[in-house]
Amino acid sequence: MTTSTPGSTPSADHAPERSTTRKNLRFALHFGEMVVAMFVGMLALGPLWSLAWPGLSDLTVASVLVMATNMTIGMAAWMRFRRHGWVSIAEMSAAMYLPFLVLLVPYAFGAISGEALMMGGHLLMLPAMLAAMLGRRHEYRH
C-alpha cells in the first residue's frame, strides 16, 4: 500500500475518487451549460416572436409553448455543438416540454393560473432535464 505525504503525489488508492469527482463535476457543468443555453434561446428568440406575433403575450397557452420552444432550440443547438446525438437531443427536448404539457391539463380546467403554468413549467423543467441526463449519465459525465 502506498501513502502520500504532504507535497507528494496522491496514491493510486485515491485516483478513482478523483476520477468520479471530475465526472460528477463535468455532469453538473453540463447541466449548467444547458440552462445557460436555454436562457440564450429564450432571450434571443423572444424578441423575434414579439415582432412576428404582436399579441402573443395575451395568449397564455401559445406563449408558454413558444417559450418552451425558444429554450429547446437554444439547448438543442448547444447539445448539437457539443456533438450529442439526435436521440439525446430529442429526449432532452421532450423533458423540456413535458412539464408544460402536464400543467396544461390543470390550467385548462381552471385549477391553476397562467402565471402558475409558466412558473411551474419552468421549475419542473429542471428536474425533468436532470432525469433525462441521469438516464444517460455516461454521456453527460464525459
Image (cartoon, helix red, strand yellow):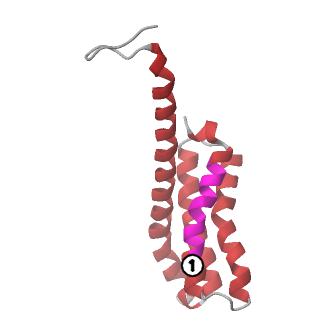
Q: Residue at x 34, y 15 (%)?
A: 9
Q: Quadrant of residue 63?
A: bottom right
Foreground: 97 or 45? Answer: 97
Q: Position of residue 126 (x, y in %)?
A: 56, 61
In the rendered view, does 61 fall on the left or right side of 56? right
| Prevailing secondary structure of the magenta residues | helix
Q: Residue at x 63, y 36 (%)?
A: 138
Q: Residue at x 46, y 76 (%)?
A: 47
Q: Could one spot residue 53 in this view of the protein?
A: no
Label 1 SS: helix
Q: Position of residue 45 (x, y in %)?
A: 50, 70
User: What are the residue bounds of the magenta stretch?
Assistant: 120-133
Amino acid of disc 1? Met
In the rendered view, does 124 fall on the left or right side of 18? right
The magenta stretch spans residue 15: no
Direction top: furthest residue = 1
Q: Quadrant of residue 112?
A: bottom right
Report which residue position mark 1 lands on: 118
Quarter the C terminus occupies: top right
Foreground: 111 or 69? Answer: 111
Q: Could one spot residue 110 in this view of the protein?
A: yes
In the rendered view, does 80 fall on the left or right side of 42? right
